[in-house]
Amino acid sequence: MLSQEENELITRVGPGTPMGAALRRYWLPALLVEELPAPDCPPVRVRLLGEDLVAFRDSMGQLGLLGAHCPHRGASLFFGRNEECGLRCVYHGWKFDVAGACVDMPSEPEESSFKHKIRHTAYPCVEKGGVIWTYMGPPAEQPPLIDLEWMRAPAGHCHVSKTYEECNYLQALEGGVDTAHSSFLHRMMNPSARTDRATERYRARAVAPKLEALVTDYGFTYAGIRSLPDDGTRYVRVYQFVMPFHQMRAYEGYAGRPLIQGHMWMPIDDEQTWVYNWMYVRDGSALTPEEIRAEETETGRAADDLLPGYRLKRNRSNDYLIDRQEQRTTSWTGIQGVNTQDIAIQESMGPIYDRTREHLGASDLAVITTRRLLLQAARDAAAGREPLGVRSSAQSVRPAEMILPEGVPWPEAMKEELLVRW
């Protein structure tokens, strides 16, 4: 368990907090590219790490992320006019470019130089992998953009989405790195209710995985090892955790194709989270429409499952439409959608879970390791040191899964499978 002090340190992410300062040292997902589809399109409200912002794409296609309120009298720039390479406040006409410079101030005398003295909050943005990334930390400490394998996939080879979750980011993140829960929370009572994948059968047969973790310069690699006593082998699923909130995992997908999937859990503020989801094929081939449709349907992220704002139709207000009859006969939870099941449980813990009340076991090693690294990152940022993983080798790693004979060490046997190929 964590102490109350540690729980506060790791969960509070707003401006001025140690964890917030640590997260601002990394490149962060601000929104999907689809949310700003064209030059001079409508601006979008954005809230990251407890800070209200407005994103826009100017006439030249450049991306801007500005403080939400005009520095003149505080009007919301969300209502601004996106025109002629700038976002113009509709209150008095002050106009700002993507760098936050005030480029026009029509309410002041023509001879005034006042506009040259105004600089609005602005964060740099980069578009890559279907995501708009931003850096919110000290400009002098800006690292290279994170460059994971899925971000390098050509158009049509990677599918990216996001969903809203109403709880602290750490609850969502800990659920993601926890491999043991997949044997329970996502179990299907009737095998015919979902594609009968071999990997799902392994997780159903061996429900108490042994965990091993290796800390790296980008985060840690960890393995869930499930002994299959019927044939003397082990199912080993190796994950990658990339600081501060990225997870990669191997996945036996539609029609048995070897997929790689992952999530990012981006804090909106202390009690809200954006969950980014991505998927690509291990061999670098294009995803098929059937694979994308199957993934969206199975997870509960299909268009019919969502409300405006990337919010789930199955949500806390309607108990996630739990079906008690299905719970008796079809699925462990009676809740449709793998990720809906995750969100239901994580939100059920409250806005910010009190970790002084928990009791961790051997299967919680990945959760424990994640907390240790995040707490150290917060302490490093507070002391003026660069947190782990800001500059790392994560671009060269991937997850994998394999059946291995008993006694064969997975780090050596799976070494080649854990290296990026393209």
Image (tube, rainbow, N blue to C red):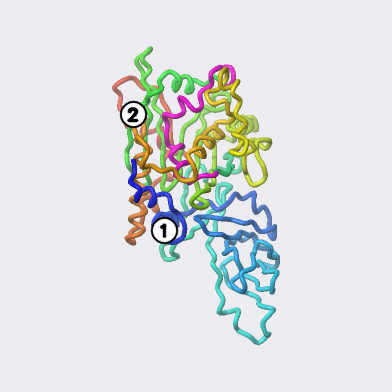
Residue 23 picture location, percent across and down:
43, 54
Q: Which of 141 and 12 is in front in this view?
A: 12
Amino acid carrying label 2: it is: Trp
Query: Badge 1, how many Cα within 10 Å: few under 14, some, many 20+?
Result: some
Residue 182 among those drawn in magenta: yes
User: Could you tell me which residue is drawn at 69 percent across and 74 percent down?
Assistant: 92
User: Could you tell me which residue is drawn at 34 percent across and 62 percent down?
Assistant: 384
**Distance of label 1 from label 2 (alpha carbons):** 39 Å
Amino acid carrying label 1: it is: Thr
User: Could you tell me which residue is drawn at 64 percent across and 37 percent down?
Assistant: 313
The residue identified by callout 2 is 410
The residue identified by callout 1 is 17
Residue 338 picture location, percent across and down:
55, 31
Q: What element carries label 1?
A: loop
State if disc 2 and disc 1 touch (CB < 8 Å): no
Classify residue 70 by image quadrant. bottom right
